[in-house]
Image: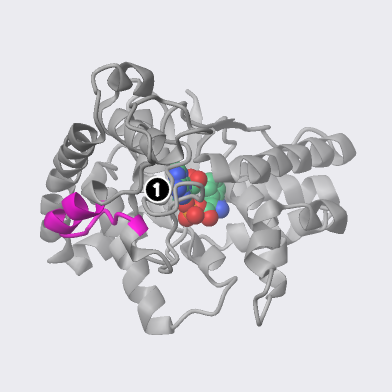
């Protein structure tokens, strides 16, 4: 059976980009693949975190994943730091990666530029991400477009390790959706929607009040023309709305565009489609949030299931490298 693995950082509330670019595919993948999903709390530590906020955000994120439909009886859902094999394989892969290739990572460049404090972990971040993926003999990794370069690096590291020490890791493929892979900010449609809170009007949160969701979509930036056309280069704002509605309804943005001659109805329908998508998620989340102990229990079982796969893979890598068995 195909193995799917993916992860998400608990560094802020889950937004519509996360949902449309990655998380909704996690849910559909469960039906046909052996799926492993992880809240990557160690990755969150690459920038300073307030401990109580990190604790709350990690639990909330796990509950959002359950609310969108990740079924812990079908998939493996766990917290990265609960399975120490991730940190150990990460070290091994840091020693497999070259400084030059880590320096080329555009996310590192973006996140370190102008930052007051740049941790060494931010630089080696992709090695930990590669460890996450390779520990589970992963075939396919459903992610948004911004993770493409990290996936390429993961493949390069697996191939290099296998070449040096013998076949140890499965070489994974990225699975990037055709629509929704790069949901853009509603106010600045040439930059991606993100967790950082510098553009609250441009970001839709999965747990946001639906009246506010509707308002933000209706106030989304478009352009001075009036034609509705799917053309992300020339018409980024309109195309973003079409892509959002398409990803939320499972249709093609080009087909949707043909049904509109004005921006107003496009915004109204997009707002409705997004609210339809979020409403049941928010209702399930409210139930789950009332039972944190139940979630903790599910996550502990998830970590046990994950470790049963991760430990033998790490052992294989240790032996291949010549580390003495213990
Ligand atoms: P993270 O936490 O930033 O985002 C989680 C997922 O959401 C996707 N995404 C988007 N998709 C479309 N449009 C957007 N505007 C948008 N913003 C985010 C991301 O591509 C991602 O799929 N490094 C990863 C976490 C990670 C991981 C892994 C992923 C750690 N280990 C192993 C896969 C496999 C990250 O920071 O994602």
Compared across the picture, whether 270 is left or right of 163 comes to left
In which quadrant of the rendered view does residue 25 lie?
Answer: top left
Residue at image location 29% in from the left, 56% down from the top: 205
Any atom of ligand 1 within 8 Å of the CB at mark 1?
A: yes
**Frontmost residue, 2 versus 45:** 45
Q: Is residue 270 magenta?
A: no
In which quadrant of the rendered view does residue 12 lie?
Answer: bottom left
**Range of residues picked out in magenta:** 202-216
- Quadrant holding the C terminus: bottom right
Coordinates of residue 267 in the picture (x, y in percent): 22, 39
Q: Is residue 24 visible?
A: yes
Residue at image location 51% in from the left, 67% down from the top: 44
How many tags in the picture? 1
Compared across the picture, whether 44 is left or right of 226 comes to right
Residue at image location 39% in from the left, 38% down from the top: 240
Coordinates of residue 7 in the picture (x, y in percent): 48, 50
Compared across the picture, whether 106 is left or right of 144 comes to right
Label 1, secondary structure: give it.
helix
Q: Is residue 89 visible?
A: no
Tell me: residue 275, above or below residue 93: above
Compared across the picture, whether 282 is left or right of 111 comes to left
**Frontmost residue, 172 versus 320:** 172
Residue at image location 65% in from the left, 46% down from the top: 150
Coordinates of residue 290 in the picture (x, y in percent): 12, 66
Residue that carries the numbered disc 1 in the rendered image? 18
Q: Residues within 10 Å of mark 1 (few under 14, many from 20)?
A: many
Tell me: residue 206, above or below residue 36: below
Visual colour scheme: one colour
Q: Is residue 204 magenta?
A: yes
């Amino acid at each position: 059976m195909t193995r799917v693995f993916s992860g998400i950082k608990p560094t802020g509330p889950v937004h519509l980009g996360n949902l449309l670019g990655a998380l909704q595919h996690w849910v559909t993948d469960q039906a046909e693949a052996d799926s492993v999903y992880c809240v990557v709390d160690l990755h969150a530590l690459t920038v300073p975190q307030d401990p109580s906020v990190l604790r709350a955000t990690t639990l909330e994120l796990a509950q959002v994943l359950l609310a969108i439909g990740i079924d812990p009886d079908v998939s493996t859902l766990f917290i990265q730091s609960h399975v120490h094999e991730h940190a150990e394989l990460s070290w091994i892969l840091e020693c497999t990666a070259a400084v030059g290739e880590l320096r080329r990572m555009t996310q590192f460049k973006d996140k370190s530029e102008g930052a007051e404090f740049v941790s060494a972990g931010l630089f080696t971040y992709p090695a930990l991400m590669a460890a996450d993926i390779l520990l589970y003999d992963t075939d396919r990794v459903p992610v948004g477009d911004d993770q493409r370069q990290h996936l390429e690096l993961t493949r390069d590291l697996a191939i290099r390790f296998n070449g040096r020490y013998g076949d140890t890791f499965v070489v994974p493929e990225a699975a990037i959706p055709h629509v929704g892979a790069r949901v853009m900010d509603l106010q600045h449609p040439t930059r991606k929607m993100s967790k950082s809170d510098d553009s609250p009007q441009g970001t839709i949160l999965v747990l946001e009040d639906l009246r506010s969701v509707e308002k933000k979509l209706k106030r989304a930036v478009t352009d001075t023309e009036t034609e509705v056309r799917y053309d992300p280069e020339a018409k980024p704002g309109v195309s973003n709305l079409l892509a959002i509605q398409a990803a939320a309804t499972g249709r093609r943005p080009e087909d949707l565009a043909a049904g509109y001659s004005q921006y107003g109805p496009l915004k109204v329908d997009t707002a409705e489609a997004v609210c339809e998508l979020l409403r049941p998620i928010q209702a399930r989340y409210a139930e789950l949030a009332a039972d944190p102990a139940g979630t903790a229990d599910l996550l502990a079982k998830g970590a046990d299931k994950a470790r049963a796969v991760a430990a033998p893979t790490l052992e294989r890598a240790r032996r291949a490298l010549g580390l003495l068995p213990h």
